[in-house]
Image: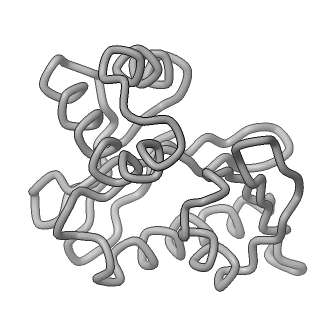
Amino acid sequence: MKVPDLPPNLAFQLLTPTAEEFEFSFQAKKQAIGPHIIKQWGWDEKYQREVHAQRLREKPFCQIELNGRPIGTLSLQMLPEYMRFGEFYLIDGFRGLGIGSKILAHCLEIADDEDVSVRLEYLLWNPVGSLYRRYGFLEAGRTPTHLLMERPKRLGSR
Protein backbone atom coordinates (compact mmCIF):
# COMPACT_ATOMS: atom_id res chain seq x y z
CA MET A 1 0.00 0.00 0.00
CA LYS A 2 1.30 3.44 -0.88
CA VAL A 3 1.23 5.56 2.26
CA PRO A 4 0.38 9.19 1.50
CA ASP A 5 3.07 11.69 2.44
CA LEU A 6 2.62 13.68 5.64
CA PRO A 7 3.32 17.37 5.00
CA PRO A 8 5.38 19.31 5.53
CA ASN A 9 8.37 16.99 5.75
CA LEU A 10 7.55 13.26 6.03
CA ALA A 11 7.45 11.05 2.94
CA PHE A 12 6.88 7.32 2.48
CA GLN A 13 8.68 5.61 -0.42
CA LEU A 14 7.84 2.01 -1.33
CA LEU A 15 10.92 -0.19 -1.03
CA THR A 16 11.93 -2.13 -4.12
CA PRO A 17 14.06 -3.53 -2.29
CA THR A 18 17.54 -3.00 -3.63
CA ALA A 19 20.54 -4.24 -1.67
CA GLU A 20 20.92 -0.72 -0.28
CA GLU A 21 17.25 -0.54 0.77
CA PHE A 22 17.46 -4.00 2.32
CA GLU A 23 20.48 -2.95 4.35
CA PHE A 24 18.89 0.30 5.51
CA SER A 25 15.62 -1.41 6.50
CA PHE A 26 17.53 -4.17 8.30
CA GLN A 27 19.65 -1.66 10.23
CA ALA A 28 16.52 0.31 11.18
CA LYS A 29 15.00 -2.90 12.58
CA LYS A 30 18.21 -3.84 14.35
CA GLN A 31 18.52 -0.41 16.00
CA ALA A 32 14.85 -0.19 17.00
CA ILE A 33 14.07 -3.68 18.29
CA GLY A 34 17.48 -5.32 18.44
CA PRO A 35 17.85 -4.53 22.15
CA HIS A 36 14.48 -6.19 22.86
CA ILE A 37 15.39 -9.27 20.83
CA ILE A 38 18.80 -9.50 22.51
CA LYS A 39 17.16 -9.34 25.95
CA GLN A 40 15.24 -12.55 25.24
CA TRP A 41 17.28 -14.54 22.72
CA GLY A 42 20.54 -12.81 21.91
CA TRP A 43 21.25 -11.65 18.37
CA ASP A 44 21.85 -14.16 15.57
CA GLU A 45 22.76 -11.93 12.62
CA LYS A 46 22.29 -14.59 9.93
CA TYR A 47 18.89 -15.65 11.28
CA GLN A 48 17.70 -12.05 11.69
CA ARG A 49 18.71 -11.22 8.11
CA GLU A 50 16.80 -14.28 6.83
CA VAL A 51 13.68 -13.30 8.80
CA HIS A 52 13.94 -9.73 7.56
CA ALA A 53 14.29 -10.85 3.94
CA GLN A 54 11.20 -13.04 4.37
CA ARG A 55 9.20 -10.10 5.80
CA LEU A 56 10.25 -7.94 2.84
CA ARG A 57 8.90 -10.62 0.48
CA GLU A 58 5.63 -10.99 2.39
CA LYS A 59 4.67 -7.36 2.99
CA PRO A 60 4.92 -4.00 1.32
CA PHE A 61 7.55 -1.88 3.09
CA CYS A 62 7.96 1.88 2.95
CA GLN A 63 11.07 3.81 3.76
CA ILE A 64 10.18 6.77 5.96
CA GLU A 65 11.97 9.95 4.96
CA LEU A 66 12.24 13.18 6.93
CA ASN A 67 13.21 16.10 4.70
CA GLY A 68 14.48 13.55 2.16
CA ARG A 69 16.61 11.64 4.70
CA PRO A 70 15.75 7.98 5.41
CA ILE A 71 14.84 7.59 9.09
CA GLY A 72 12.90 4.33 9.30
CA THR A 73 10.50 1.80 7.86
CA LEU A 74 6.81 1.00 7.95
CA SER A 75 4.62 -1.72 6.51
CA LEU A 76 0.98 -0.74 6.08
CA GLN A 77 -1.38 -3.27 4.49
CA MET A 78 -5.05 -2.81 3.68
CA LEU A 79 -6.72 -6.18 4.10
CA PRO A 80 -10.42 -6.95 3.57
CA GLU A 81 -11.36 -6.72 7.26
CA TYR A 82 -8.72 -4.38 8.71
CA MET A 83 -5.52 -2.45 8.17
CA ARG A 84 -2.25 -4.09 9.30
CA PHE A 85 0.33 -1.75 10.84
CA GLY A 86 3.80 -3.21 11.31
CA GLU A 87 7.53 -3.23 10.74
CA PHE A 88 7.53 0.30 12.14
CA TYR A 89 11.12 1.14 13.03
CA LEU A 90 12.84 4.48 13.46
CA ILE A 91 16.63 4.66 13.45
CA ASP A 92 18.68 5.94 16.38
CA GLY A 93 18.32 9.65 16.94
CA PHE A 94 14.72 9.81 15.68
CA ARG A 95 12.90 7.94 18.44
CA GLY A 96 11.39 9.85 21.35
CA LEU A 97 10.91 13.05 19.32
CA GLY A 98 7.20 12.66 18.53
CA ILE A 99 7.84 11.51 14.95
CA GLY A 100 6.52 8.02 15.65
CA SER A 101 3.35 9.45 17.19
CA LYS A 102 2.79 11.65 14.12
CA ILE A 103 3.21 8.69 11.78
CA LEU A 104 0.92 6.47 13.85
CA ALA A 105 -1.78 9.19 13.96
CA HIS A 106 -1.42 9.62 10.18
CA CYS A 107 -1.93 5.89 9.60
CA LEU A 108 -4.94 5.84 11.92
CA GLU A 109 -6.50 8.68 9.90
CA ILE A 110 -6.05 6.55 6.77
CA ALA A 111 -7.83 3.67 8.52
CA ASP A 112 -10.64 5.99 9.61
CA ASP A 113 -11.05 7.22 6.03
CA GLU A 114 -11.31 3.58 4.91
CA ASP A 115 -13.65 2.72 7.83
CA VAL A 116 -11.52 -0.17 9.09
CA SER A 117 -9.92 -1.22 12.35
CA VAL A 118 -6.13 -1.41 12.73
CA ARG A 119 -4.19 -4.42 13.99
CA LEU A 120 -0.59 -4.75 15.10
CA GLU A 121 1.67 -6.86 17.26
CA TYR A 122 4.82 -6.26 19.27
CA LEU A 123 7.19 -8.15 21.56
CA LEU A 124 5.71 -8.53 25.05
CA TRP A 125 8.71 -6.91 26.73
CA ASN A 126 8.93 -3.95 24.34
CA PRO A 127 7.70 -0.76 26.08
CA VAL A 128 6.09 0.54 22.84
CA GLY A 129 2.72 -0.74 24.08
CA SER A 130 2.13 2.45 26.06
CA LEU A 131 2.20 4.44 22.79
CA TYR A 132 -0.35 2.16 21.18
CA ARG A 133 -2.67 2.29 24.21
CA ARG A 134 -2.63 6.12 24.08
CA TYR A 135 -3.96 5.84 20.53
CA GLY A 136 -6.87 3.58 21.46
CA PHE A 137 -5.40 0.14 20.82
CA LEU A 138 -6.77 -2.66 22.98
CA GLU A 139 -5.30 -6.07 23.68
CA ALA A 140 -6.80 -8.60 21.27
CA GLY A 141 -4.67 -11.61 22.16
CA ARG A 142 -1.25 -12.93 23.09
CA THR A 143 1.24 -15.43 21.86
CA PRO A 144 4.16 -16.65 23.98
CA THR A 145 6.21 -13.75 22.56
CA HIS A 146 3.84 -11.08 21.23
CA LEU A 147 0.97 -8.90 22.34
CA LEU A 148 -1.70 -8.57 19.64
CA MET A 149 -3.55 -5.26 19.61
CA GLU A 150 -6.43 -3.75 17.70
CA ARG A 151 -7.78 -0.24 17.44
CA PRO A 152 -11.46 -0.57 16.57
CA LYS A 153 -12.78 1.37 13.63
CA ARG A 154 -14.15 4.75 14.58
CA LEU A 155 -17.90 5.00 14.82
CA GLY A 156 -19.20 7.38 12.22
CA SER A 157 -15.84 7.61 10.47
CA ARG A 158 -17.60 7.36 7.15
Is residue 110 shown left or right of residue 142? left
Is residue 57 placed above or below 130 in the rendered structure?
A: above
Using the image as rendered, state which of residue 45 and residue 133 is in the foreground. 45
Is residue 147 placed above or below 87 in the rendered structure?
A: below
Tell me where residue 124 appears, x and y as whole percent.
67, 56
Q: Quadrant of residue 126?
A: bottom right
Tell me where residue 139 appears, x and y as whole percent.
84, 65
Using the image as rendered, state which of residue 147 and residue 25 is in the foreground. 147
Tell me where residue 66 appears, x and y as whole percent.
18, 65
Is residue 153 shown left or right of residue 106? right
Number of callouts: 0
Is residue 138 placed above or below 64 in the rendered structure?
A: below
Query: Dividing the image into 4 quarters, which one contains the C terminus?
Result: bottom right
Name which residue lies at 20% across and 72% down: 9
Name which residue lies at 22% across and 70% down: 94
Using the image as rendered, state which of residue 158 and residue 57 is in the foreground. 57
Name which residue lies at 60% across and 72% down: 109
Is residue 106 placed above or below 146 in the rendered structure?
A: below
Name which residue lies at 62% across and 79% down: 130
The image's colour scheme reads one colour
Using the image as rendered, state which of residue 40 and residue 157 is in the foreground. 40
Tell me where residue 146 appears, x and y as whole percent.
71, 47
